[in-house]
Image (tube, rainbow, N blue to C red):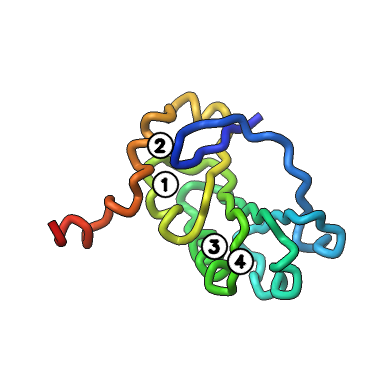
């Protein structure tokens, strides 16, 4: 099982019917990407997609941040979900680049409770520019 993290806290991550990029023709509105996938491969399918999950193999692998930003710049308006062992400290940056939610393993949710994630839910105020404006 896994936990879905949003600005409001934790919720159970229900089953999602996604396909890998290689099986894009079989999608039912949701696709899984790896950090090495090219977002341009989704151009024709973007209007029909409602969910894109981007896997993080490790919290230290930042390639998915760029992938998410590129998808938003291409016009994807559906849900972007980060998937993997991410840290609560990364939540503000995940939101800034375009992610709507984060799916983390149950064990990680046990070590980083919802309060730690919610603390960073005001992600627009947690940057140096906001602090300089005050």
Q: Residue at x 86, y 59 (%)?
A: 26
Q: Residue at x 52, y 62 (%)?
A: 63
- In x, y percent, where is residue 23? 83, 60
Query: Quick one: label 2 or label 4, which is nearer the N terminus?
Result: 4
* For marks 3 and 4 on the same chain, the one whose residue lies earlier in the sequence: 3
Q: Observer-nearest residue: 39 or 5?
A: 5
Q: CA distance from mark 3 to mark 4?
A: 9 Å
Q: Is label 4 or label 1 in front? A: 4
Q: Mark 1 vs mark 3: which is more N-terminal?
A: 3
Question: In this figure, which residue is indicated by the disc labeled 1?
Answer: 91
Q: Which residue is mark 2?
A: 117
Q: CA distance from mark 2 to mark 4?
A: 25 Å
Locate residue 89 relative to residue 54 in the image: left or right: left
- The residue that disc 4 covers is 76
Task: State whether residue 26 is above or below residue 71.
Answer: above
Q: Are marks 2 and 3 in contact (CB under 8 Å)?
A: no
Q: Residue at x 13, y 56 (%)?
A: 134
Where on the picture, by quarter, is residue 115? top left
Badge 2, how many Cα within 10 Å: few under 14, some, many 20+?
many
Pick whichever, 38 or 118, lies toward us: 118
Disc 1 crowd rating (10 Å Cα; few below 14, some 14-19, many 20+) is many
Residue at the extreme top: 110
Q: Give how far across and how far down residue 85 sits, in percent.
A: 53, 41
Q: Which residue is mark 3?
A: 68
Q: Earlier in the sequence, mark 2 or mark 1?
A: 1
Badge 4: how crowded within 10 Å, few (<14), some, or many (20+)? many
Q: Is residue 116 left or right of 78 when viewed as pictured?
A: left
Q: Are marks 2 and 1 in contact (CB under 8 Å)?
A: yes
The CA distance from mark 1 to mark 3 is 14 Å
Percent position of residue 70, x then y: 54, 70
């Amino acid at each position: 099982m896994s936990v879905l993290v949003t600005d409001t806290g934790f919720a159970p991550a229900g089953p999602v019917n996604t396909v890998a990029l290689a099986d894009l023709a079989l999608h039912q509105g949701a696709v899984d990407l790896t950090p090495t996938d090219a977002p341009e491969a989704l151009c024709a399918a973007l209007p029909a997609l409602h969910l894109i999950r981007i896997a993080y193999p490790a919290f230290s692998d930042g390639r998915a941040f760029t992938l998410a930003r590129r998808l938003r710049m291409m016009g994807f308006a559906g849900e972007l979900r980060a998937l993997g062992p991410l840290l609560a400290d990364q939540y503000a940056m995940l939101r800034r680049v375009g992610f709507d939610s984060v799916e983390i393993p149950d064990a990680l949710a046990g070590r980083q409770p919802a309060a730690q994630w919610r603390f960073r839910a005001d992600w627009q105020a947690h940057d140096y520019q906001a602090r300089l404006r005050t």
